[in-house]
């Protein structure tokens, strides 16, 4: 089990300037951690526009706070970005993010994963870091309403609601879920066939490592990663909102079995080193 917090990374000075100084990023999970994705939080430093083009990656972005406009620079199509909206862009997608203010906070998941120190080049891209997943034909946007309409809101383990924004069918090499646990909800979990990266957005809850007995109390900005060897117990101290990313990706309909696991959906990566 791997635990990191944004506060720890900030205190270590691990804040990267991106978008040519218009934004910063905290890189919570990177290529060195052995998964097919990295996790960052991007933070606007000022209102304005950033022109971006991820030639060598697919990126999924979940809006945590603030408002902005996403523009496809090829077609001119625009979408409103606000909390709960997810947008995905890939190698064909020259796009702009027009920030209404400096409150914008976006959770970004990249495949292939970032090394961690990248900043945008003149085209708004990052250098190559590995094989590019197939993705979809072009950039796309999903709202919670879209997820509900598609029937991808699943009650899991009798204590959590999982809103599955991305599944294996999207071809990004990971699935992306917004998970909500009501205060007092708890359960035993053991992802025998997957690695799961979790970032707490709101609330406080406990994660108990069944192997060591250690209890981790996690709040907003905390990341924990669990895999096949990590039997664990979660308990919500308050209402909790967590972003969960799975590798290999889920199909979208899974619920927990008696062990708190999901059925296999693909090859299991090595994951973080036991020493972390």
Image: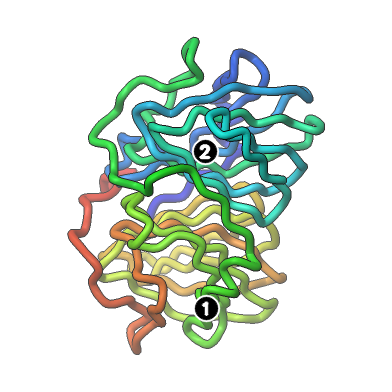
Between 3 and 178, the residue placed more toward the observer is: 178
Q: Circle 1 sits on which residue?
A: 151
At 49% from the left and 56% from the top, the residue drawn is: 198
Q: Circle 2 sits on which residue?
A: 40
Whole-angstrom CA distance, mark 2 to mark 1, is 28 Å
Check the image and name the residue furthest to the front: 75
Check the image and name the residue furthest to the left: 267
User: In this image, 55 relative to 11: left or right?
Assistant: left
At 31% from the left and 51% from the top, the residue drawn is: 173
At 70% from the left and 62% from the top, the residue drawn is: 203
Q: Under tag 2, what secondary structure?
A: strand
Residue 95 higher or lower than 219, as above or below:
above
At 56% from the left and 68% from the top, the residue drawn is: 147
The quarter of the picture where the C terminus appears is top left
Check the image and name the residue furthest to the top: 122
Q: Position of residue 77 (x, y in %)?
A: 62, 39
Residue 129 higher or lower than 194, as above or below:
above
User: In this image, 153 relative to 66: left or right?
Assistant: left
Q: Quadrant of residue 73?
A: top right
């Amino acid at each position: 089990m791997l635990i990191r917090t944004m506060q720890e990374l900030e205190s270590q000075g691990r804040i990267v300037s991106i978008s040519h100084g218009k934004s910063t990023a905290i890189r919570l999970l990177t290529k060195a951690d052995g998964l097919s994705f990295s996790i960052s939080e991007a933070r606007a430093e000022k209102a304005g526009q950033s022109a971006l083009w991820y030639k060598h990656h697919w990126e999924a972005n979940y809006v945590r706070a603030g408002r902005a406009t996403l523009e496809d620079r090829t077609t001119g199509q625009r979408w409103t970005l606000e909390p709960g909206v997810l947008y995905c862009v890939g190698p064909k997608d020259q796009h702009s993010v027009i920030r209404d203010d400096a409150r914008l906070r976006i959770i970004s998941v990249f495949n292939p994963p970032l090394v961690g120190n990248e900043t945008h080049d003149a085209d708004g891209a990052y250098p190559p870091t590995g094989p590019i997943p197939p993705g979809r034909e072009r950039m796309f946007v999903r709202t919670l309403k879209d997820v509900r309409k598609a029937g991808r809101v699943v009650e899991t383990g009798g204590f959590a609601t999982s809103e599955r924004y991305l599944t294996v069918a999207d071809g990004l090499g990971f699935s992306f879920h917004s998970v909500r646990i009501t205060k007092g909800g708890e359960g035993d979990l053991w992802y025998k066939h997957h690695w799961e990266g979790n970032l707490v957005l709101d609330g406080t809850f406990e994660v108990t490592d069944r192997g060591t007995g250690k209890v981790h109390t996690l709040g907003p900005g905390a990341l924990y990663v669990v895999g096949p060897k990590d039997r664990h117990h979660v308990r919500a101290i308050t209402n909790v909102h967590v972003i969960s990313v799975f590798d290999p990706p889920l199909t979208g309909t899974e619920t927990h079995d008696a062990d708190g696991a999901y059925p296999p959906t693909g090859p299991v990566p090595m994951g973080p080193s036991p020493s972390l």
